[in-house]
Image: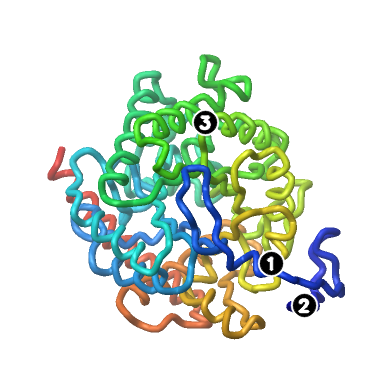
């Protein structure tokens, strides 16, 4: 039995200065998913955008080295960073692509490494929609021709064009193809990314989706693309393949998708054989996944979306996971006590990839959360992501991560790396065009 004292005020569920007795070790017990695959424990490495692909947008030795640290870090499942379903639609120039033409061997190696320590290997699959840097591609598909609004940074992003119905059906096929190839490579499942302002999230948002056809208007129509993709992936990949969905608890923007609508989407997913719903939030315009919002809703100082996820868990027929702002064992335990089945961690594992093992040795060990306190939310978000990616690149090169990386130097190094990757990406696209 563990006696834990909490002094951080989080919310009424996680009360301050309260003493909570834990008589079990829920975090470190197995969880059997609806597809019958078993996680050895309840802690999951959530996705981060590494921007570390090798030649031809494939995983190579740097990603293999990075994931080897997590594979032997005591995790129950490991979700990859974005794997793109279309090489012409990239969240970043160094992203990994798995499409119908990609060689399968690098992905087999990747899956083997991820699974080598006993964790499930889950590939996150994604399409960025309008969240594309103009340097990578000047034009981007979106539900409607609604550009990102990021103040002085707006011009750095692609022009949004409304997808045709034919393009929408092509996107469905691309997601299914990537999922089938992930299964072929030996991954235990895929996570379909419908959060953080990427394409599927854009279709769900009434701010971005202003269509008047069967793909827009009512929530049922706005969710149609996600529902179609999930249904097709489940049907084509079989019942023994794990299908996860990452969903915003809300967009945290006035007029965006609400928490009530998120619950309604989960109610639809209940009927489709989904194994896990991961709850996060935000987008490039409103980086709630880094703890920043400006609407009437507030986030917790740690485990940002735990309260929202606990509410969604009440209607979910599958295990629920929440990610964002978790770096301490007491907070992870509170998440499971609040009603979530799985605890997702990302940034804390960039600095301490074996954090779960450290917790088992020392329950008071605190992971490092890299953040920027600048008032400019877009610049602060870019700095935070640059610090995280710098840590990931160091691990990929078998260098020790830095506990306090310089914000300015991290931003400069990330810009240099992105420029190099952009030149390589544009050369690749030009060769193939």
- Between 371 and 392, the residue placed more toward the observer is 392
C-alpha distance separating marks 3 and 1: 29 Å
Q: Earlier in the sequence, mark 3 or mark 1?
A: 3
Task: Please give left or right for residue 206 compared with residue 190 in the image.
Answer: right
Number of the label disc, if any, that sits on residue 272: 3
Tell me if 56 is positioned left or right of 327 in this view: left
Circle 3/circle 1 CB separation < 8 Å: no
Q: Please, which residue is most extreme toward the top here?
A: 213
Q: Which image quadrant for residue 410?
A: bottom left
Q: Is residue 360 visible?
A: yes
Tell me the residue at 33%/29% (across/down): 173
Q: Which residue is mark 1?
A: 333
The percent position of residue 75, horizontal first and vertical second, equals: 48, 67
Q: Residues within 10 Å of mark 2 (few under 14, many from 20)?
A: some
Query: SS at mark 1?
Result: helix
Q: Nearer the viewer, residue 384 or 2?
A: 2
Local packing at callout 3 (Cα closer than 10 Å; few below 14, some 14-19, many 20+) is: some
In this rendered view, identify the residue nearer to me: 315 or 322. 315
Q: Secondary structure at mark 3?
A: loop
Q: Is residue 249 left or right of residue 162?
A: right
Q: Are marks 1 and 2 in contact (CB under 8 Å)?
A: yes
Q: Residue, x 53% and y 20% (percent of image)?
A: 211
- Badge 1: how crowded within 10 Å, few (<14), some, or many (20+)? some
Tag 2 residue = 4
- Whether 337 is drawn above or below 99: the answer is below
Q: Residue 49: percent from the left, percent from the top?
A: 42, 58
For the N terminus, the quadrant is bottom right
Dot 2: what SS? strand
Q: Nearer the viewer, residue 421 or 334?
A: 334
The C terminus: image quadrant: top left
């Amino acid at each position: 039995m563990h006696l834990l004292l909490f002094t951080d005020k989080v919310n009424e569920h996680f009360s301050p200065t309260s003493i909570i007795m834990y008589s079990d070790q829920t975090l470190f017990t197995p969880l059997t998913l609806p597809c019958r695959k078993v996680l050895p424990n309840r802690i999951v490495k959530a996705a981060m955008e590494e921007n570390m692909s090798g030649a031809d947008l494939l995983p190579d030795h740097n990603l293999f080295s990075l994931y080897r640290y997590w594979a032997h870090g005591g995790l129950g499942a490991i979700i990859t960073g974005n794997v793109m379903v279309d090489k012409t639609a990239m969240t970043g120039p160094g992203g990994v692509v798995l499409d119908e033409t990609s060689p399968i061997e690098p992905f087999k190696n990747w899956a083997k490494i991820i699974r080598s320590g006993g964790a499930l290997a889950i590939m996150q699959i994604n399409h960025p929609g309008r969240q594309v840097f103009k340097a990578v591609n000047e034009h981007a598909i979106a539900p409607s021709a609604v550009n990102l609004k990021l103040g002085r940074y707006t011009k750095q992003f692609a022009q949004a064009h409304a997808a045709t119905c034919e393009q929408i059906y092509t996107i469905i096929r691309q997601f299914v193809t990537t999922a089938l190839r992930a299964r072929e490579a030996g991954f235990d499942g895929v996570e379909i990314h419908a959060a953080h302002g990427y394409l599927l999230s854009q279709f769900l948002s009434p701010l971005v989706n202003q269509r008047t056809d069967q793909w827009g208007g009512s929530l049922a129509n706005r969710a149609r693309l996600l529902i179609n993709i999930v249904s097709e992936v489940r049907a084509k990949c079989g019942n023994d393949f794990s299908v996860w969905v990452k969903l915003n608890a809300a967009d945290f923007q006035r007029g965006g998708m609400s928490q009530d609508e998120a619950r309604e989407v989960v109610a639809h997913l209940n009927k489709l054989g989904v194994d896990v719903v991961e709850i996060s939030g935000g987008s490039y315009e409103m980086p709630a996944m880094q703890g920043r919002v400006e609407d009437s809703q507030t986030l917790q100082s740690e485990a940002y979306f735990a309260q929202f996820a606990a509410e969604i868990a009440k209607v979910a027929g599958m295990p629920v996971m929440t990610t964002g702002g978790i770096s301490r064992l007491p907070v992870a335990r509170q998440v499971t006590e609040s009603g979530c089945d799985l605890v997702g961690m990302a940034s804390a594992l960039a600095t301490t990839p074996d954090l779960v093992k450290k917790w088992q040795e020392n329950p008071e060990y605190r992971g490092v959360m890299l953040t920027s306190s600048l008032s400019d939310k877009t610049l602060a978000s870019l700095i935070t992501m640059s610090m995280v990616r710098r840590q990931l690149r160091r691990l990929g090169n078998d260098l020790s991560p830095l506990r306090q990386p310089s914000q300015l130097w991290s931003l400069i190094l990330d810009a240099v790396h992105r420029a190099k990757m952009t030149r390589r990406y544009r050369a690749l696209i030009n060769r193939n065009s």
